Image: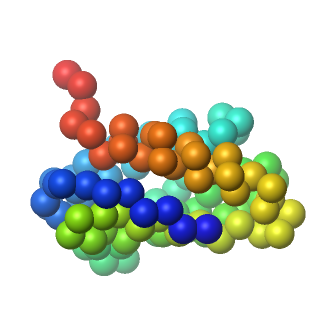
Amino acid sequence: MQVTLPHNLGKDQLRHRLRTRSHEIADHIPGGMAQVETEWPSPDRMLMTIRFMGQILAGDIVLEDSSVLLSIDLPPALGFIEPMVESAVRKHGQDLLAAPED
């Protein structure tokens, strides 16, 4: 599954927001039962390990100049949740990229 989110941030600001707010990703996964671990193998790529519904999912976020590309490998047993996950990413992804409220 891949979802592209547009942004108008510079890469430095985008990296900063994702690094400081990545702990919020699990809050936006439907069901509220997910655990997300992240790591940055390069400045423009964040890897995710998502524990959800007894499954361990791999995903990544690639930072591009005008978009963020989110990819998650969903096993066939969880294929039915793809529309829900995509909807949540589109809805909450922009919130995650937005400036945090003071």
Q: Is residue 49 above or below residue 25?
A: below
- Residue at left 18%, top 54%? 8
Please, which colouring scheme is shown? rainbow
Outermost residue to the bottom = 42
84 or 74: nearer the viewer: 84
- Residue at left 71%, top 66%? 74
- Residue at left 51%, top 49%? 89
For this view, does 77 lie left or right of residue 45? Answer: right
**Which x, y percent locates residue 40?**
36, 69
For this view, does 79 lie left or right of residue 100? Answer: right
Outermost residue to the top = 102
**Quadrant containing the N terminus in the rendered view:** bottom right
**Quadrant containing the C terminus in the rendered view:** top left
67 or 14: nearer the viewer: 67
* Quarter assignment of residue 100: top left
**Which x, y percent locates residue 57?**
67, 64
Q: Is residue 93 above or below residue 48?
A: above
**Which x, y percent locates residue 19?**
30, 53
Kindly tell me whether residue 86 is visible in this rendering: yes
88 or 59: nearer the viewer: 88
* Quarter assignment of residue 28: top right
Kindly tell me whether residue 39 is visible in this rendering: no
- Residue at left 24%, top 25%? 101
Q: Is residue 57 above or below residue 98?
A: below
For the image, the number of numbered tags is: 0
Outermost residue to the right = 77
**Which x, y percent locates residue 23?**
44, 44
For this view, does 70 lie left or right of residue 87? Answer: left
